[in-house]
Image (spheres, helix red, strand yellow):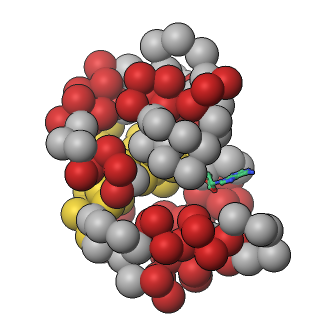
Amino acid sequence: MELMERTFAIIKPDAVERRLTGQVLARIEAAGFTVRAMRLQHLTKAEAEGFYAVHRERPFFGALTDFMSSGPCVLLALEAPNAIAEWRTLMGATDPGKADAGTLRKDFGSSIDRNATHGSDAPETAAFELGYFFRGLELR
Ligand code: CMP
């Protein structure tokens, strides 16, 4: 049996506001992920800053954390074999203009800032990001 892995995903405020949550979740399940935890949450600016702390020196940090705290997100723990890489493939490139056809960011993102979804980029970030938003009890 292939080794199961978990990753952390966000349906960002642009996609939630445009009522794309159901379509994104349908694509997640059709791709073979199991949703292990899920919550709708309107992040505070401080929560967004803590989540994206690795980017705090980047020029886009202020705009990113303003946007991520501008409306509710859907926070997700996704499970599948090779989930971290598979979720990044399903999302497509960070910039929707460079994303492959059939990816979520190509189909639902509008710009590099409003790119519909987020996903962990490595096992260490997945562990940090899952733990940042979900309690151990929610992740059994
Ligand atoms: P995300 O995967 O959530 O991680 C950080 C986010 O910063 C990224 O998606 C983009 O929405 C946003 N961002 C804005 N500008 C850039 C940039 N130049 N490079 C990477 N990410 C950017």
- Residue at the image position 39 percent from the left and 31 percent from the top: 108
Q: Is residue 84 visible?
A: no
> Where 96 falls versus 6 (above or below)?
above
Q: Quadrant of the C terminus?
A: bottom left
Camera-side residue: 119 or 34? 119
Q: Position of residue 99 (x, y in %)?
A: 61, 23
Camera-side residue: 135 or 24? 24
Q: Position of residue 79 (x, y in %)?
A: 42, 41
70 horizontally vs 120: left or right: left
> Where 82 falls versus 129 (above or below)?
above
- Residue at the image position 36 percent from the left and 70 percent from the top: 70
The residue lying furthest to the bottom in this view is 46
- Residue at the image position 24 percent from the left and 51 percent from the top: 17
Q: Position of residue 122 (x, y in %)?
A: 70, 49
- Residue at the image position 53 percent from the left and 11 percent from the top: 101
The residue lying furthest to the top in this view is 101
Q: Position of residue 24 (x, y in %)?
A: 30, 33
7 horizontally vs 17: left or right: right
Camera-side residue: 79 or 118? 118
> Where 39 falls versus 16 (above or below)?
below
Q: Is residue 16 visible?
A: yes
User: What number of labels is visible?
Assistant: 0
